[in-house]
Image (cartoon, rainbow, N blue to C red):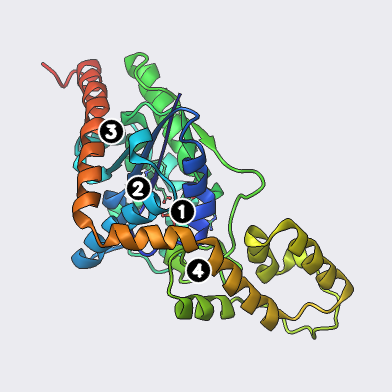
Amino acid sequence: MRILSGIQPSGKLHVGNYFGMMKPMIENMDRGELYAFIVNFHALTSVQDKEALRRDTLEAAADFLALGLDPERCVFWVQSDVPEVTELMWYLSSLTPMGLLERCHSYKDKVAKGIAATHGLFSYPVLMAADILLYQADIVPVGKDQKQHLEVARDIAIKFNNSFGDTFVVPEAQISETLATVPGTDGQKMSKSYGNTIGIFLSQKELKKRVMAIVTDASPVEAPKDPDTCNLYNIFKLFASAERLVEVHDLYVGGGAAYGYLKLELVDILWEYFREAREKRDAFIADHGYLREVLAKGAEKARQKASSTIDLVRERIGIRY
Ligand code: ADP
Ligand code: TRP
Protein backbone atom coordinates (compact mmCIF):
# COMPACT_ATOMS: atom_id res chain seq x y z
CA MET A 1 0.00 0.00 0.00
CA ARG A 2 1.41 3.40 -0.98
CA ILE A 3 0.53 6.39 1.20
CA LEU A 4 1.26 9.85 -0.17
CA SER A 5 0.70 13.45 0.87
CA GLY A 6 2.15 16.89 0.19
CA ILE A 7 2.41 20.20 1.95
CA GLN A 8 2.87 23.68 0.49
CA PRO A 9 5.90 25.73 1.56
CA SER A 10 3.79 28.87 1.39
CA GLY A 11 4.54 30.17 4.89
CA LYS A 12 5.32 28.83 8.32
CA LEU A 13 3.72 25.48 9.07
CA HIS A 14 1.02 25.61 11.72
CA VAL A 15 -0.77 23.33 14.15
CA GLY A 16 -3.59 22.76 11.59
CA ASN A 17 -1.02 21.33 9.18
CA TYR A 18 0.43 19.28 12.01
CA PHE A 19 -2.81 17.58 13.07
CA GLY A 20 -4.41 17.46 9.62
CA MET A 21 -1.52 16.07 7.66
CA MET A 22 1.95 15.85 9.22
CA LYS A 23 1.06 13.80 12.29
CA PRO A 24 -1.07 11.28 10.34
CA MET A 25 1.73 10.94 7.80
CA ILE A 26 4.34 10.34 10.48
CA GLU A 27 2.07 7.79 12.14
CA ASN A 28 1.62 6.04 8.79
CA MET A 29 5.36 5.48 8.37
CA ASP A 30 5.20 1.78 9.10
CA ARG A 31 1.78 1.08 7.62
CA GLY A 32 2.94 1.11 4.04
CA GLU A 33 5.29 2.71 1.58
CA LEU A 34 5.23 6.38 2.58
CA TYR A 35 5.71 9.23 0.06
CA ALA A 36 5.89 12.71 1.60
CA PHE A 37 6.75 15.83 -0.36
CA ILE A 38 6.90 19.59 -0.33
CA VAL A 39 4.75 21.01 -3.09
CA ASN A 40 6.62 24.13 -4.19
CA PHE A 41 4.91 24.26 -7.62
CA HIS A 42 1.59 24.61 -5.82
CA ALA A 43 3.01 27.31 -3.57
CA LEU A 44 3.65 29.50 -6.63
CA THR A 45 -0.08 30.14 -6.77
CA SER A 46 0.28 32.31 -3.68
CA VAL A 47 3.99 33.13 -3.24
CA GLN A 48 5.92 35.42 -5.56
CA ASP A 49 8.91 36.08 -3.34
CA LYS A 50 11.80 33.89 -4.40
CA GLU A 51 13.77 34.18 -1.16
CA ALA A 52 10.70 33.34 0.89
CA LEU A 53 9.92 30.31 -1.28
CA ARG A 54 13.48 28.97 -1.05
CA ARG A 55 13.61 29.50 2.70
CA ASP A 56 10.17 28.05 3.37
CA THR A 57 10.91 24.99 1.23
CA LEU A 58 13.95 24.10 3.32
CA GLU A 59 12.19 25.04 6.53
CA ALA A 60 9.22 22.81 5.69
CA ALA A 61 11.70 19.97 5.19
CA ALA A 62 13.34 20.71 8.55
CA ASP A 63 9.92 20.89 10.23
CA PHE A 64 8.82 17.54 8.88
CA LEU A 65 12.03 15.80 9.88
CA ALA A 66 12.04 17.43 13.33
CA LEU A 67 8.48 16.27 13.96
CA GLY A 68 9.52 12.68 13.37
CA LEU A 69 9.54 11.87 9.66
CA ASP A 70 12.40 9.44 9.11
CA PRO A 71 13.86 9.78 5.59
CA GLU A 72 15.20 6.22 5.78
CA ARG A 73 11.67 4.87 6.15
CA CYS A 74 9.96 6.95 3.48
CA VAL A 75 10.45 8.81 0.22
CA PHE A 76 10.78 12.50 1.06
CA TRP A 77 11.40 15.09 -1.64
CA VAL A 78 10.54 18.45 -3.17
CA GLN A 79 7.90 18.36 -5.92
CA SER A 80 9.89 20.38 -8.49
CA ASP A 81 12.79 17.92 -8.33
CA VAL A 82 10.59 15.50 -10.29
CA PRO A 83 9.38 17.73 -13.15
CA GLU A 84 7.54 14.86 -14.86
CA VAL A 85 4.59 15.91 -12.71
CA THR A 86 4.02 18.97 -14.92
CA GLU A 87 4.00 16.78 -18.03
CA LEU A 88 1.41 14.50 -16.48
CA MET A 89 -0.60 17.55 -15.46
CA TRP A 90 -0.95 18.53 -19.11
CA TYR A 91 -2.16 15.08 -20.10
CA LEU A 92 -4.70 15.13 -17.29
CA SER A 93 -5.76 18.72 -18.05
CA SER A 94 -6.61 17.67 -21.55
CA LEU A 95 -9.35 15.39 -20.27
CA THR A 96 -10.48 17.28 -17.16
CA PRO A 97 -13.92 18.85 -17.67
CA MET A 98 -14.06 22.57 -16.80
CA GLY A 99 -17.18 21.92 -14.72
CA LEU A 100 -15.23 19.66 -12.37
CA LEU A 101 -12.85 22.50 -11.53
CA GLU A 102 -15.54 25.17 -11.50
CA ARG A 103 -17.20 23.35 -8.62
CA CYS A 104 -14.10 23.44 -6.37
CA HIS A 105 -14.67 25.48 -3.19
CA SER A 106 -11.00 25.98 -2.51
CA TYR A 107 -10.52 28.17 -5.60
CA LYS A 108 -13.52 30.32 -4.72
CA ASP A 109 -12.49 30.59 -1.06
CA LYS A 110 -8.94 31.58 -1.91
CA VAL A 111 -10.05 34.22 -4.41
CA ALA A 112 -12.51 35.57 -1.83
CA LYS A 113 -9.56 35.88 0.57
CA GLY A 114 -7.62 38.00 -1.90
CA ILE A 115 -5.39 35.43 -3.64
CA ALA A 116 -5.01 36.33 -7.33
CA ALA A 117 -7.46 34.47 -9.57
CA THR A 118 -4.84 32.97 -11.88
CA HIS A 119 -5.07 30.01 -14.19
CA GLY A 120 -2.60 28.20 -11.90
CA LEU A 121 -4.90 28.62 -8.92
CA PHE A 122 -7.85 27.38 -10.97
CA SER A 123 -6.02 24.32 -12.25
CA TYR A 124 -4.36 23.61 -8.87
CA PRO A 125 -6.48 20.45 -8.37
CA VAL A 126 -5.20 19.00 -11.67
CA LEU A 127 -1.59 19.43 -10.55
CA MET A 128 -2.56 17.79 -7.28
CA ALA A 129 -4.16 14.90 -9.17
CA ALA A 130 -0.94 14.56 -11.17
CA ASP A 131 1.02 14.43 -7.89
CA ILE A 132 -1.09 11.59 -6.62
CA LEU A 133 -1.50 9.59 -9.83
CA LEU A 134 2.16 9.88 -10.88
CA TYR A 135 3.17 7.87 -7.81
CA GLN A 136 0.19 5.50 -8.00
CA ALA A 137 -0.81 6.32 -4.41
CA ASP A 138 -3.50 4.20 -2.73
CA ILE A 139 -4.09 6.40 0.32
CA VAL A 140 -3.78 10.17 0.72
CA PRO A 141 -3.91 11.52 4.33
CA VAL A 142 -5.15 15.13 4.27
CA GLY A 143 -7.25 17.56 6.27
CA LYS A 144 -10.97 17.79 5.49
CA ASP A 145 -10.47 20.88 3.34
CA GLN A 146 -8.73 18.70 0.74
CA LYS A 147 -11.54 16.16 0.46
CA GLN A 148 -12.95 17.71 -2.69
CA HIS A 149 -9.52 17.79 -4.33
CA LEU A 150 -9.22 14.06 -3.69
CA GLU A 151 -12.57 13.53 -5.36
CA VAL A 152 -11.29 15.45 -8.38
CA ALA A 153 -8.18 13.24 -8.48
CA ARG A 154 -10.35 10.13 -8.33
CA ASP A 155 -12.66 11.40 -11.09
CA ILE A 156 -9.69 12.18 -13.32
CA ALA A 157 -8.11 8.76 -12.68
CA ILE A 158 -11.36 6.97 -13.49
CA LYS A 159 -11.89 9.03 -16.63
CA PHE A 160 -8.34 8.33 -17.82
CA ASN A 161 -8.63 4.61 -17.08
CA ASN A 162 -11.94 4.43 -18.95
CA SER A 163 -10.53 6.26 -21.95
CA PHE A 164 -7.11 4.64 -22.23
CA GLY A 165 -7.27 1.40 -20.27
CA ASP A 166 -6.30 0.73 -16.66
CA THR A 167 -3.34 2.96 -15.91
CA PHE A 168 -3.80 4.67 -12.57
CA VAL A 169 -4.59 3.50 -9.09
CA VAL A 170 -7.78 5.28 -7.97
CA PRO A 171 -6.71 6.92 -4.67
CA GLU A 172 -8.64 7.12 -1.41
CA ALA A 173 -8.51 10.08 0.99
CA GLN A 174 -7.68 9.38 4.63
CA ILE A 175 -9.33 12.04 6.77
CA SER A 176 -9.36 11.84 10.54
CA GLU A 177 -12.97 11.84 11.70
CA THR A 178 -12.11 13.02 15.19
CA LEU A 179 -10.02 15.85 13.90
CA ALA A 180 -11.37 17.12 10.64
CA THR A 181 -10.42 20.77 10.83
CA VAL A 182 -8.30 22.67 13.32
CA PRO A 183 -9.82 26.14 13.92
CA GLY A 184 -7.67 29.23 13.60
CA THR A 185 -7.43 32.10 16.10
CA ASP A 186 -10.57 33.62 14.53
CA GLY A 187 -12.56 30.37 14.51
CA GLN A 188 -12.39 29.79 10.73
CA LYS A 189 -10.26 26.93 9.38
CA MET A 190 -6.66 27.60 10.41
CA SER A 191 -4.85 28.45 7.18
CA LYS A 192 -1.69 30.20 6.10
CA SER A 193 -3.77 32.16 3.63
CA TYR A 194 -6.14 33.47 6.31
CA GLY A 195 -3.59 34.97 8.72
CA ASN A 196 -5.16 33.10 11.64
CA THR A 197 -2.50 30.50 12.36
CA ILE A 198 -0.56 29.36 15.38
CA GLY A 199 2.84 28.29 14.06
CA ILE A 200 4.41 25.08 15.30
CA PHE A 201 7.84 26.62 15.75
CA LEU A 202 7.28 30.21 16.85
CA SER A 203 9.49 31.98 19.38
CA GLN A 204 7.99 32.06 22.86
CA LYS A 205 7.11 35.72 22.41
CA GLU A 206 5.40 35.19 19.05
CA LEU A 207 3.59 32.14 20.37
CA LYS A 208 2.17 34.15 23.25
CA LYS A 209 1.04 36.87 20.86
CA ARG A 210 -0.76 34.38 18.61
CA VAL A 211 -2.47 32.55 21.49
CA MET A 212 -3.57 35.83 23.06
CA ALA A 213 -5.13 36.70 19.69
CA ILE A 214 -7.54 33.76 19.88
CA VAL A 215 -11.00 35.28 19.63
CA THR A 216 -13.33 34.53 22.56
CA ASP A 217 -16.73 35.89 23.51
CA ALA A 218 -17.33 38.63 26.08
CA SER A 219 -19.08 36.51 28.72
CA PRO A 220 -17.86 37.02 32.33
CA VAL A 221 -15.67 34.42 34.08
CA GLU A 222 -18.50 33.11 36.29
CA ALA A 223 -20.93 32.56 33.40
CA PRO A 224 -21.43 28.94 32.27
CA LYS A 225 -20.15 28.52 28.71
CA ASP A 226 -20.47 25.93 25.98
CA PRO A 227 -16.96 24.52 25.46
CA ASP A 228 -17.77 23.02 22.07
CA THR A 229 -18.51 26.38 20.49
CA CYS A 230 -15.48 28.04 22.10
CA ASN A 231 -12.58 28.50 19.78
CA LEU A 232 -10.07 28.60 22.64
CA TYR A 233 -11.37 25.32 24.07
CA ASN A 234 -11.29 23.66 20.66
CA ILE A 235 -7.61 24.50 20.27
CA PHE A 236 -6.84 23.76 23.94
CA LYS A 237 -8.28 20.26 23.69
CA LEU A 238 -5.79 19.28 21.00
CA PHE A 239 -2.90 19.68 23.41
CA ALA A 240 -4.06 19.37 27.03
CA SER A 241 -3.78 16.11 28.97
CA ALA A 242 -7.01 14.12 29.36
CA GLU A 243 -7.21 14.95 33.10
CA ARG A 244 -6.71 18.65 32.60
CA LEU A 245 -9.26 18.67 29.82
CA VAL A 246 -11.93 17.22 32.14
CA GLU A 247 -11.20 19.99 34.68
CA VAL A 248 -11.36 22.70 32.06
CA HIS A 249 -14.54 21.25 30.58
CA ASP A 250 -16.13 21.43 34.06
CA LEU A 251 -15.04 25.05 34.41
CA TYR A 252 -16.77 25.92 31.16
CA VAL A 253 -19.98 24.13 31.99
CA GLY A 254 -20.17 25.14 35.65
CA GLY A 255 -18.78 28.68 35.27
CA GLY A 256 -15.31 29.86 36.20
CA ALA A 257 -13.41 29.51 32.93
CA ALA A 258 -11.15 32.58 32.68
CA TYR A 259 -10.03 32.97 29.10
CA GLY A 260 -6.90 34.99 29.94
CA TYR A 261 -5.55 32.32 32.30
CA LEU A 262 -6.43 29.50 29.94
CA LYS A 263 -4.59 31.26 27.16
CA LEU A 264 -1.46 31.61 29.28
CA GLU A 265 -1.72 27.94 30.19
CA LEU A 266 -2.09 27.07 26.51
CA VAL A 267 1.12 28.98 25.70
CA ASP A 268 3.01 26.84 28.24
CA ILE A 269 1.42 23.61 27.03
CA LEU A 270 2.24 24.37 23.40
CA TRP A 271 5.80 25.34 24.25
CA GLU A 272 6.38 22.01 26.00
CA TYR A 273 4.47 19.99 23.40
CA PHE A 274 6.87 20.94 20.63
CA ARG A 275 10.01 21.36 22.76
CA GLU A 276 11.85 18.29 21.59
CA ALA A 277 10.94 18.85 17.94
CA ARG A 278 12.03 22.49 18.24
CA GLU A 279 15.47 21.47 19.40
CA LYS A 280 15.85 19.03 16.54
CA ARG A 281 14.59 21.59 14.07
CA ASP A 282 17.20 24.14 15.16
CA ALA A 283 19.89 21.55 14.37
CA PHE A 284 18.43 20.83 10.91
CA ILE A 285 18.09 24.51 10.06
CA ALA A 286 21.75 24.96 10.91
CA ASP A 287 22.68 22.21 8.44
CA HIS A 288 21.30 23.00 5.00
CA GLY A 289 23.83 20.58 3.50
CA TYR A 290 22.19 17.69 5.29
CA LEU A 291 18.68 18.81 4.31
CA ARG A 292 19.66 19.10 0.66
CA GLU A 293 21.28 15.68 0.74
CA VAL A 294 18.16 14.06 2.23
CA LEU A 295 15.93 15.77 -0.36
CA ALA A 296 18.21 14.83 -3.27
CA LYS A 297 18.17 11.16 -2.26
CA GLY A 298 14.38 11.32 -1.89
CA ALA A 299 13.98 12.91 -5.33
CA GLU A 300 16.04 10.14 -6.88
CA LYS A 301 13.75 7.49 -5.39
CA ALA A 302 10.60 9.41 -6.30
CA ARG A 303 11.81 9.85 -9.85
CA GLN A 304 12.15 6.12 -10.40
CA LYS A 305 8.48 5.63 -9.66
CA ALA A 306 7.51 8.72 -11.66
CA SER A 307 9.44 7.59 -14.75
CA SER A 308 7.74 4.25 -14.94
CA THR A 309 4.28 5.85 -14.69
CA ILE A 310 5.03 8.57 -17.22
CA ASP A 311 6.41 6.02 -19.70
CA LEU A 312 3.24 3.99 -19.40
CA VAL A 313 1.07 7.09 -19.82
CA ARG A 314 2.96 8.28 -22.93
CA GLU A 315 2.47 4.84 -24.41
CA ARG A 316 -1.23 4.71 -23.54
CA ILE A 317 -2.11 8.08 -25.05
CA GLY A 318 0.03 7.91 -28.18
CA ILE A 319 2.63 10.48 -27.25
CA ARG A 320 5.36 7.90 -27.69
CA TYR A 321 5.42 7.41 -31.47
P1 ADP B 1 -2.91 26.12 4.44
O1 ADP B 1 -4.41 26.12 4.33
O2 ADP B 1 -2.47 26.67 5.73
O3 ADP B 1 -2.22 26.77 3.26
P2 ADP B 1 -2.14 23.69 3.22
O4 ADP B 1 -3.20 23.94 2.21
O5 ADP B 1 -0.71 23.82 2.80
O6 ADP B 1 -2.44 24.64 4.44
O7 ADP B 1 -2.38 22.29 3.88
C1 ADP B 1 -1.44 21.29 4.10
C2 ADP B 1 -2.12 20.13 4.78
O8 ADP B 1 -2.56 20.50 6.07
C3 ADP B 1 -3.36 19.62 4.04
O9 ADP B 1 -3.46 18.23 4.17
C4 ADP B 1 -4.48 20.27 4.77
O10 ADP B 1 -5.68 19.54 4.69
C5 ADP B 1 -3.95 20.28 6.20
N1 ADP B 1 -4.54 21.39 6.92
C6 ADP B 1 -4.36 22.70 6.68
N2 ADP B 1 -5.05 23.45 7.53
C7 ADP B 1 -5.71 22.58 8.34
C8 ADP B 1 -6.60 22.74 9.43
N3 ADP B 1 -6.94 23.94 9.87
N4 ADP B 1 -7.07 21.63 10.02
C9 ADP B 1 -6.72 20.39 9.59
N5 ADP B 1 -5.89 20.18 8.57
C10 ADP B 1 -5.38 21.26 7.95
N1 TRP C 1 -3.37 20.80 -2.08
C1 TRP C 1 -2.76 20.35 -0.87
C2 TRP C 1 -2.97 21.42 0.19
O1 TRP C 1 -3.16 22.56 -0.10
C3 TRP C 1 -1.29 20.09 -1.04
C4 TRP C 1 -1.02 19.01 -2.03
C5 TRP C 1 -0.50 19.17 -3.27
C6 TRP C 1 -1.24 17.63 -1.84
N2 TRP C 1 -0.35 17.97 -3.85
C7 TRP C 1 -0.80 17.00 -3.03
C8 TRP C 1 -1.77 16.88 -0.81
C9 TRP C 1 -0.90 15.62 -3.20
C10 TRP C 1 -1.87 15.50 -0.99
C11 TRP C 1 -1.43 14.87 -2.17
O2 TRP C 1 -2.93 21.08 1.31
Residue type (three-letter) at the residue carrying disc 3: Ser
Residue type (three-letter) at the residue carrying disc 1: Ser
Q: Is mark 1 within 8 Å of ligand 2?
A: yes
Q: Nearer the viewer, mark 4 or mark 3?
A: 4
Q: Secondary structure at mark 3?
A: loop
Residue 255 tag number: none
Q: Which residue is mark 1?
A: 106
Q: Which residue is mark 4?
A: 198
**In-front residue for pair 306/277:** 277
Q: Nearer the viewer, mark 3 or mark 1?
A: 1
Q: Which residue is drawn at the image coordinates 16% and 22% (left, top)?
A: 319
Q: Secondary structure at mark 2?
A: helix
244 sits to left or right of 180: right
Q: Which residue is drawn at the image coordinates 63% and 50% (left, top)?
A: 179
Q: Is mark 2 within 8 Å of ligand 2?
A: yes
Label 1 to label 4, Cα distance in Å? 21 Å
Q: Which residue is mark 2?
A: 124
Q: Which residue is mark 3?
A: 94
Marks 3 and 1 in Cβ contact (< 8 Å): no
Q: Residue 157 placed where, x, y %? A: 40, 27
Location of the C terminus by quadrant is top left
Q: Residue furthest right?
A: 254
Instruction: Find residue 112 and report its image quarter.
Output: bottom left
Marked residue nearer the N-terminal end (3 or 2):
3
